[in-house]
């Protein structure tokens, strides 16, 4: 997977790529991250990438020419499946399913906006997809782009040490992950649940599944509708034995 990140603040991006799973994957050659300085595609003395908005109004708008040049220059011929993504609070919401979907591409070209955003004509001509990381406005697309790189990278084969880590993560079955415990066994009067010391993997798995469903019910009931579709009969019986009756779409219809 090749990630090309276009920004006027390349150092900001590089500084976030020094440690952790993404840095390791990059150093091991499992992914390539090319940080593209948008100012390298300007032709004036001040290396200008923005201008005042036509029609007046606040702020500055990123001009289309350097952006389009940077996209064209970044696109790799050998990458047949590539996508140009503009990070934008107006885009569709980035989520785990989108991370899985993007993992199928060979190259992602991530365009980081600044100021009031980008000229509309650049968006229309060059952008395949617009992604938002949430309903709030940040001052630039760099952090959202890094979030996309991180979420996609950790799903790529061979990136995580333990292959199960991503499969059992929150959202993988539209469920939040179960609570987790490590040493010490007692922390400020709170004990680790006994079952986790039983050595009985089947009991532990069931306990974790129930905890995961409970947590999802409490915090993200909106996810459960999707999650129940994947519940087996055995799992449904287990939940009922714990007093958890999950209403499925089918039940609602009678
Ligand atoms: N004026 C724009 C608006 O009202 O829609 C907001 C521009 S914002 C200050 C500057 C840049 O930050 C955007 O072009 C985008 O690249 C990035 N950005 C801000 N919030 C974001 C979000 N929630 N998700 C993704 N990118 C975001």
Image: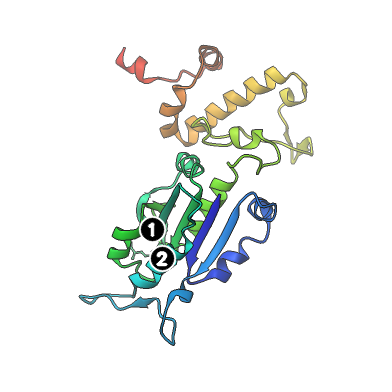
Q: Position of residue 26 (x, y in %)?
A: 65, 54
Between 207 and 190, the residue placed more toward the observer is: 207
With respect to residue 105, does 61 lie above or below?
below
Left or right: where does residue 55 sit relative to residue 42?
Answer: left
Q: Are marks 2 and 1 in contact (CB under 8 Å)?
A: yes
Which residue occupies the extreme bottom position in the image?
45
Q: Quadrant of residue 33?
A: bottom right
The residue lying at 54 percent from left, 69 percent from top is 10
Q: Quadrant of residue 65?
A: bottom left
With respect to residue 39, does 81 lie above or below?
above
* Circle 2: element type: loop
On the rendered image, what quadrant is the C terminus found in?
top left
Between 63 and 233, the residue placed more toward the observer is: 63
Whether residue 43 is visible, yes or no, is yes
How many marks on residues? 2
The residue lying at 30 percent from left, 60 percent from top is 125
* Circle 1: element type: strand
With respect to residue 216, does 24 lie above or below?
below
Looking at the rendering, the quadrant in which ligand 1 lies is bottom left
- Which residue does the numbered mark 1 point to in the structure image? 88
Q: Is mark 2 within 8 Å of ligand 1?
A: yes
The residue lying at 41 percent from left, 81 percent from top is 43
Whether residue 139 is visible, yes or no, is no
* Disc on the earlier residue, 2 or 1: 1
Q: Which mark is residue 141?
A: none
Q: Position of residue 80 (x, y in %)?
A: 46, 48
- Which residue does the numbered mark 2 point to in the structure image? 113
């Amino acid at each position: 997977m090749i990630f090309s990140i276009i920004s006027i603040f390349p150092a900001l991006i590089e500084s976030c790529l020094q440690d952790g799973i993404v840095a390791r994957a990059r150093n091991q050659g499992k992914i390539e991250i090319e940080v593209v300085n948008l100012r390298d595609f300007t032709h004036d003395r001040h290396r200008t990438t923005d201008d005042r908005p036509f029609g007046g109004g606040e702020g500055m708008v990123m001009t289309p020419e350097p952006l389009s040049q940077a996209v064209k220059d970044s696109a790799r011929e050998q990458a047949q499946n590539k996508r140009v993504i503009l990070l934008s609070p107006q885009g569709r919401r980035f989520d785990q399913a989108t991370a899985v979907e993007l993992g199928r591409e060979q190259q992602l070209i991530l365009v980081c906006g600044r100021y009031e955003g980008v000229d509309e004509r650049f968006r229309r001509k060059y952008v395949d997809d617009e992604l938002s990381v949430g309903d709030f406005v940040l001052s630039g697309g760099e952090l959202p782009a890094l979030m996309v790189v991180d979420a996609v990278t950790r799903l790529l084969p061979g990136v995580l040490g333990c292959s199960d880590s991503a499969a059992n993560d929150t959202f993988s079955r539209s469920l939040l992950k179960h609570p987790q415990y490590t040493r010490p066994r007692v922390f400020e009067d709170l004990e680790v649940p006994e079952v986790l010391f039983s050595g009985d993997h089947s009991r532990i798995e069931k306990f974790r599944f129930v905890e995961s469903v409970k947590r999802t019910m409490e915090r993200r009931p909106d996810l459960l509708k999707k999650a129940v579709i994947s519940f087996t009969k055995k799992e449904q019986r287990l939940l009922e034995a714990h007093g958890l009756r999950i209403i499925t779409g089918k039940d609602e219809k009678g």
